[in-house]
């Protein structure tokens, strides 16, 4: 069948509204490098390009995998491109190959720029980072498109914490400084939990369809009320981690303003989650994604003072 997918169809498959999370993860790591007086703008840019490419690849793989496994139906809302027939499976496979290639090219350029700059350009270090990159690509594909998708067994939330939080933030910091600070684990974990909250919003919205298809996400296992409580636990844990880290890094007016902003972001978001029906949670997803990026931008502004 001839593919007649439009640009809008491809943009929908890429799920643009989730891409700020990838940038926020990298920029948080770059902030940690800046606080250590070793920020490298070119490495930050390449980290951002690589992270966004990986997120785009993951989103395409998710659309493809859920359609192939019968989780997404043609009438699903919001529409899924492969399941609805707007993009053929063959066209999506080609797009996945292209996106994976972009991840590899960007990742290799990143390592070629970063590793010599931090004096870590030995064979073992290259092998380590190539392995981490390969693991990220494999995890992005295996979430729903693998033969035994781990996302269907409820491991997606942990994967987001690992790749958006620990690898994304700490990896960005390390590739600019050549070292990791113990305190960095706090913002890395907090940001990873915030990113997992985006996935949980998605899974709460889809839990009825997921249960019918045998996709047992954490949200599907917990049910509507339990999934919202789980969401609050993630938000509360991240809130505490941010508070402890802010007290270690900032003081004065910057510290006070950031605490107020953190409380407002977390409180307003949780209020909206608990006041919104499961099917309507989709409208909170882009709001929270942008909120995460805005928070990191405000941390940068505070660090510049």
Image: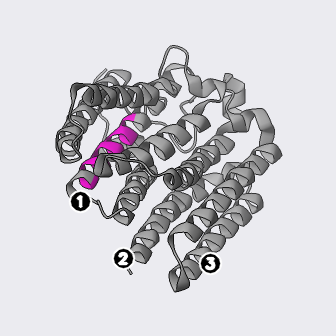
Residue 14 in which image quadrant? top left
Measured from the top left, where is residue 151 in percent x and y? 58, 28
Structure colour scheme: one colour
Residue found at the far top of this picture: 147
Write down the residue under mark 3. 260
Name the secondary structure under disc 1.
helix
Closer to the camera in the image, 274 or 265: 265
The tag earlier along the polypeptide, 3 or 1, is 1
The tag earlier along the polypeptide, 2 or 1, is 1
Magenta-colored stretch includes residue 285: no
Measured from the top left, where is residue 233 in percent x and y? 74, 51
- The vertical placement of 104 against 248, above or below, is above
Which span of residues is magenta-colored? 44-57
- The vertical placement of 70 against 220, above or below, is above
Estimate how packed mark 2 is, as few (under 14), some (14 to 19) or many (20 or more) residues with alpha carbons within 10 Å. few
**Which residue shows up at 60% across the image and 70% down it?**
262
**Which residue shows up at 65% across the image and 65% down it?**
266
Measured from the top left, where is residue 136 in percent x and y? 40, 31
Estimate how packed mark 1 is, as few (under 14), some (14 to 19) or many (20 or more) residues with alpha carbons within 10 Å. few
Write down the residue under mark 1. 41
Estimate how packed mark 3 is, as few (under 14), some (14 to 19) or many (20 or more) residues with alpha carbons within 10 Å. few
Contact (Cβ within 8 Å) of mark 3 with mark 1:
no
- For the N terminus, the quadrant is top left
From the image, give the main secondary structure of the stretch colored magenta.
helix
Describe residue 283's horizontal placement relative to residue 116 as left or right. right
Residue 167 in which image quadrant? top left
Write down the residue under mark 2. 304
Magenta-colored stretch includes residue 53: yes
**Which residue shows up at 59% across the image and 70% down it?**
247
Measured from the top left, where is residue 214 in percent x and y? 68, 22
Mark yes or no: residue 15 visible.
no
């Amino acid at each position: 069948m001839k593919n007649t997918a439009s640009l809008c169809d491809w943009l929908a498959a890429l799920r643009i509204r989730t891409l700020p999370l990838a940038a926020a993860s990298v920029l948080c790591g770059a902030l940690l490098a800046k606080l250590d007086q070793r920020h490298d703008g070119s490495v930050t840019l390449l980290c951002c390009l690589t992270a966004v490419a990986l997120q785009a690849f993951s989103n395409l793989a998710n659309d493809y995998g859920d359609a192939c496994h019968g989780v997404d139906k043609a009438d699903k809302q919001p529409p899924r491109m492969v399941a609805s027939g707007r993009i053929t499976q063959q066209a999506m496979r080609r797009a996945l190959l292209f996106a994976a290639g972009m991840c590899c090219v960007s990742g290799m350029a990143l390592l070629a720029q970063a590793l010599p700059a931090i004096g870590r350009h030995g064979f073992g270090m290259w092998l380590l980072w190539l392995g981490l990159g390969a693991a990220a690509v494999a995890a992005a594909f295996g979430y729903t498109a693998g033969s035994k998708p781990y996302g269907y067994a409820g491991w997606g939330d942990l994967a987001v914490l690992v790749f958006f939080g620990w690898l994304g933030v700490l990896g960005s910091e390390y590739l600019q400084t050549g070292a990791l600070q113990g305190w960095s684990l706090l913002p890395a974990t907090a940001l990873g939990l915030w990113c997992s909250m985006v996935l949980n919003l998605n899974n709460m919205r889809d839990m009825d369809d997921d249960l019918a298809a045998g996709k047992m996400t954490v949200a599907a296992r917990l049910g509507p009320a339990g999934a919202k409580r789980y969401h609050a636990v993630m938000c509360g844990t991240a809130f505490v981690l941010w508070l402890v880290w802010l007290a270690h890094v900032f003081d004065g007016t910057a510290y006070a303003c950031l605490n107020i902003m953190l409380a407002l972001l977390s409180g307003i978001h949780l209020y909206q989650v608990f006041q919104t029906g499961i099917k309507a949670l989709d409208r909170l997803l882009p709001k929270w994604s942008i909120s995460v990026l805005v928070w990191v931008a405000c941390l940068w502004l505070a660090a510049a003072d």
